[in-house]
Every structure is written in C-alpha cells, then in structure tokens.
C-alpha cells in the first residue's frame, strides 16, 4: 500500500538508493539482522535506465557471494588494449592483470539481480520513492522525508544508509561533505554502437588530448557492437566543446567507427576524487558512489562500491543488534573499508593528478616504454620503473609515488 501525505513509516534500517551498492548493503545487513530493512528507490524500475559502460573486473564476485553470473555477463574479454595518440599499443592480458581482467555486463540485469538477492533475505523495496531531506535531531540522523506520487511522508529509522549515487544529496544534507571540485569530476557521454569494426575480445582505451584529462573507451557487447564512450575532466571543458562533441569528433575521424550506428546514448558523471575524510555520522553511513569510492584512474565504481557495501551491511547489522548506531560505533565501518580500499584510492588519485598533466608526446612515450619493457605486474612501481628505464626524464615528477 502506498503511504499517504503526512504518514509516518518506521523501520530499523533505511537504505536510500536501490542501485547495486544500496541493494548489497541491505542484503548483508539482512543476513545478519532480523529486523525491518527497507530500500527506497526514486526510479520506477531498478537498474533502468542504465548509466554505465558496464565494464568490470570479475575477481571480487565470490567475495560478494554472487554465485550465478551468466545471465548478467554480456561478454568476457581476454584483456585490455591501451592506445597512445601516436598509435603505440599496450596489451594487458591475464598474465599482467590477474583477476582484474574483466567482462562487460548487462547492468540493468545485474542491478535487478542484486535487488533479488536482497529481497530473498527479507529486504523490503519501495519504488518511485525519493528521499527529499534527512531528518536530524541534535546532529543525529533519525530518518528521511520522502515523496511518492506527490505525497510527502516521513520514514523514521534507527540507521540510514545513503546509497544515492554520484549525485548524492544525503551526504550534503547531512553536512558530511561539500560539492566536488570540477577537476575531481569526470563528465561522460556514451553511445551503444552497432555495425562497428573492432576487436571484440578486448576492452579498448584511447588516451591523450582526444579526451582531455580522461579517456575514450570501447567495451564490447558482442560482434560489431560496443559501448563507445568518453570521460573528460570537467575542469578541462572551456565551453567551446562538450564531452559529446569530443566523442563525436573521435568517431568521425575513425573509419572503423564512423560507419556504425548509435542505438542508445547515456550521459553522466563520476567522481575521481580522493576518498572523503568521513562517511559516517550518528545514525548515518554513506556507501558506493555516495561515499566517493570510485577508482580515480579508471572511473570504475562498481567493484569498490560492492566491497564497501558488504562491510557497510555487516557493520549496520552489528550496530542494530547492539543498539548503538552512534558515529563512534560506526567507526568500525570506517576502519574496515579504509583498510581494504583507501591506500589504492589515494595512490590512484595521485597517479590521476599526474596523468592529467601529460601531453600527447608523453603518453606516446609511456605506452611505448610499457609495450617495450615487458613488465611483469601492473603495480605503480613496476610501471614507473619500466617507463623510467626508457624515458628517465618523464618520471621525475612521479618519484614521490614510489
Ligand atoms: C557513463 C558512465 C560509465 C560508467 N562506467 C563504469 C564501468 O564501466 N565500470 C564501473 O565499475 N563503473 C562505471 N561507472 C560508475 C558506476 O556506474 C557507479 O560506480 C555505480 O553505479 C555505483 O553504484 P551506486 O549504487 O553507488 O550508485 P547508482 O548506481 O547511481 O545508484 C544510486 C541509486 O540511488 C537512486 N537515488 C538517487 N537519489 C535518490 C533519492 N533522493 N531517493 C531515492 N533514491 C535515490 C538512483 O535512482 C539510483 O538508482 C560509470 C558511470 C558513468 C556515469
């Protein structure tokens, strides 16, 4: 039954956002806590429309207890190919990337599957329901004001998890952080293209000034069909060209692409920022894109967010079982997710800050050196050593990352 204007609903744990990360946090909470857990989602359908290039590594799926994957995997790939502006190519296969070598999925099916797994644990979903503010008493979050079909009502909860994505309002309403700096936002545009001529067994990444401060991706969805998209650092857009203009120009200039047909288009943003100083306060946790755990180099947020969501759900259950949802108790969440993800997030943020300063010639040198040197692992150190061997001057400004 739909709530009426002015109603007050109650639950123990309220998750705002039914994306894959919100559903996963709710699922792991429900596995460990038997009270009422609710997810509200502003859209009318979980997972749709898709705003994603759908590329993932696959090594983390077991850890997340996701057993059946065939139905949401669209295409497994053998590895990735990176291209510099001058045409140098670096192939990264399983021997280098290990289980980071990935797949391209059907994101709408994946998101729905994550909701099904949560639903089976007893989580309740309410669709077409937007949080429109948080309710706070003396600095403690007590629930949200929500709207469904024009009716405004209250949802009271002992604990709220904000999983409302890149544009998270929960984090801002609760004063956890400010807006992102334009240099820490990647603005993206993507076409699903068909009838294009490319190698469908790899993901493809084009670096350099064709995509200022970002890159162009081609993620295969099958024979002759791929997600063809681009991310550009927001601070590098001066108003003369949009990210879509950059993407259109690249497509137009490449014969193997410009014969193709676009069958859908997607626009969106991702954070490529350092992790926030905190993602909890009394009665509130943030997770996934709302907690800004997107990898600053790749712009991929699914794997990090899912790993963080499992921890969030487990700690939320413990907090509810022990009747303590204070910021102090929720430090258990901060400690566990930071232990798992924070070092790499910072390292990749620093690497991104340097990479956005490289010009086309330097990208040529980096890819040339890496394809030449046969590096044995994909660590920052190994990359810098290999590049330094051939182009010592190029890595001087990267020395602090060693
Ligand atoms: C163009 C593009 C390409 C990308 N490609 C990749 C990729 O290839 N690989 C990868 O790993 N990552 C990729 N990402 C990032 C990835 O999509 C995110 O990291 C991922 O979706 C994060 O999941 P989430 O559940 O935190 O947020 P979301 O998936 O954004 O889910 C948040 C949910 O919250 C709901 N919501 C928001 N506000 C409210 C509210 N007030 N009340 C109720 N519900 C609300 C939204 O409707 C949404 O369903 C890409 C992003 C973009 C924009």
Image (spheres, grey):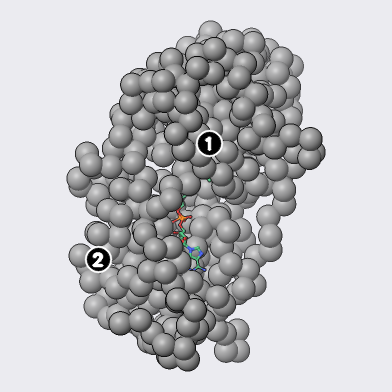
- Decide if residue 157 is on the left or right side of residue 65: right
Snapshot quadrant of residue 80:
top left
Residue 48 seen in the figure = yes
Category of crowding for the residue at label 2, using alpha-carbon neighbours closer than 10 angstroms: few (below 14), some (14–19), many (at least 20): some
Which residue is depicted at the point 44% across and 34% down? Answer: 263
**Residue 190 coordinates in the image, percent (x, y):** 53, 36
Report helix, strand or loop for mark 1: strand
**Residue 151 coordinates in the image, percent (x, y):** 47, 83
Q: Mark 2 points at which residue?
A: 119
Q: Which of marks 1 and 2 is in front?
A: 1
Which residue is depicted at the point 42% across and 25% down? Answer: 194
Q: Which quadrant of the rendered structure holds the N terminus?
A: bottom left
**Mark 1 vs ligand 1: CB below 8 Å:** yes
**Residue 241 coordinates in the image, percent (x, y):** 74, 34
Q: Is residue 290 above or below residue 153?
A: above
Q: Residue 190 carries which label?
A: 1
């Amino acid at each position: 039954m739909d709530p009426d204007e002015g109603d007050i609903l109650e639950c123990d744990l309220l998750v705002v956002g039914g994306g894959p990360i919100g559903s996963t946090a709710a699922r792991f909470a429900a596995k460990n806590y038997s009270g009422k857990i609710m997810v509200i989602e502003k859209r009318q359908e979980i997972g749709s429309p898709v705003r994603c290039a759908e590329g993932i590594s696959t090594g983390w799926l077991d850890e997340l207890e996701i057993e059946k994957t065939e139905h949401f995997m669209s295409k497994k790939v053998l590895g990735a190919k990176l291209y510099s502006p001058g045409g140098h190519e670096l192939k990264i296969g399983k021997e280098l990337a290990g289980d980071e070598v990935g797949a391209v999925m059907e994101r709408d099916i994946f998101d729905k599957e994550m909701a099904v797994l949560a639903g089976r644990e007893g989580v309740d979903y309410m669709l077409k329901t937007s949080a429109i503010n948080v309710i706070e008493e003396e600095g403690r979050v007590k629930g949200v004001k929500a709207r469904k079909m024009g009716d405004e009502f209250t949802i009271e909860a002992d604990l709220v998890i904000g999983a409302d994505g890149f544009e998270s309002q929960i984090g801002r309403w609760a004063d956890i952080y400010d807006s992102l700096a334009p240099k820490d936002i990647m603005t993206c545009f993507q076409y699903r293209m068909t009838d294009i001529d490319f190698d469908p067994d790899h993901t493809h990444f084009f670096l350099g000034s064709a995509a200022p401060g970002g890159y162009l991706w081609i993620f295969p969805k099958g024979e002759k069909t791929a997600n063809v998209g681009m991310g550009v650092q927001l601070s590098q857009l001066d108003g003369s060209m949009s990210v879509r203009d950059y993407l259109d120009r690249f497509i137009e200039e490449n014969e193997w692409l410009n014969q193709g047909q676009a069958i859908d288009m997607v626009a969106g943003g991702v954070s490529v920022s350092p992790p926030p100083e905190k993602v909890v306060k009394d009665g509130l946790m943030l997770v996934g894109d709302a907690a800004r755990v997107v990898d600053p180099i790749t712009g991929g947020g699914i794997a990090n967010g899912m790993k963080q969501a499992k921890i969030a759900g487990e700690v939320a259950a413990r907090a509810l079982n022990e009747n303590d949802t204070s910021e102090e108790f929720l430090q258990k969440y901060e400690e566990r997710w930071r232990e798992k993800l924070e070092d790499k997030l910072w390292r990749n943020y620093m690497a991104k800050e340097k990479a956005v300063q490289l010009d086309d010639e330097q990208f040529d040198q980096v890819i040339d050196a890496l394809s030449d040197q046969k590096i044995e692992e994909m660590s920052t150190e190994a990359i810098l050593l290999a590049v330094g061997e051939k182009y010592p001057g190029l890595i001087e400004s990267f020395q602090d990352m060693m």
